[in-house]
Amino acid sequence: MSSKSYLPSAVTCLRFIATPLFFYSFSGGQYIISLLIIVFAGVTDILDGYLARRMDSTSTLGAYLDVTADFTLIFVSFLAFVVRGWYDSWVLLLISTLFVVFLASSRLKKPIYDPVGKYLGSFLMGMILLSLLFPQPFLRQILLIILVLLSIISLISRFIFLSGTYKV
């Protein structure tokens, strides 16, 4: 295996580095820096997948590393939001539950097709970005309602496909 095949994972690891930087900058009220860190993290998320496909170095381990980096960044970002009073603490439980269900159902032999859950991580990253760009409480409430609805639909669809009631 060439050293170039490790490049996608190295790019993924940049999100692990960005995570405490985001928490520190947001907690310190440096919202512009926080915004730049989230944009950087989004770019690395796109770039690592592109590189893995381009270099034909996709792997199960790399996919789990990517998801874990996303979850860590999302969870810590919402933790910072909770600490600042932007969101209620129960949102952390919701995000954690979604991640655990994803991991548990992804480890099964048969793939679980979840058209909503596939985009839930992207929505959460977008929610962080929009919360930073437009920090009005009303918008955050709308985003939270959408998150709850998407989460419910995602969980229902995962359990339907998991039960075998519906097959792709």
Image: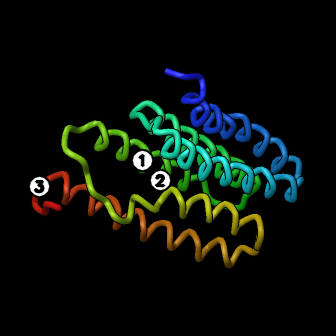
Where is residue 63, by image quadrant? top left
Front residue of this view, candidates 17 and 89: 17
Circle 2 residues within 10 Å: few <14, some 14–19, many ≥20: some
Judging from the image, what secondary structure is the residue with disc 3 in? loop
Using the image, determine if residue 9 lies above or below residue 41: above
Say whether residue 70 is left or right of residue 119.
right
Cα separation, mark 1 vs mark 2, equals 5 Å
- Could you tell me how far apart the alpha carbons at marks 3 and 1 are, in whole angstroms? 22 Å
Q: Is residue 56 above or below residue 149?
A: above
Q: From the top left corner, tell me how far across and down residue 158 is, in percent.
A: 27, 56
Residue visible at 46% across and 66% down in the picture: 148
Find disc 3 in the rendering and name its residue. 164
Question: SS for tag 1?
Answer: helix
Kindly identify the residue that appears in the image at 58 percent across and 37 percent down: 8
Residue type indicated by callout 3: Gly
Question: As rendered, which of 50 and 142 lies closer to the eye?
Answer: 50
Measure the alpha-carbon separation of dots 3 and 2.
25 Å
Which amino acid lies under the numbered mark 1 shown in the image of this protein?
Thr
Q: Which mark is residue 97?
A: 1
Q: Is residue 39 left or right of residue 72?
A: right
Residue at numbered disc 2: 94
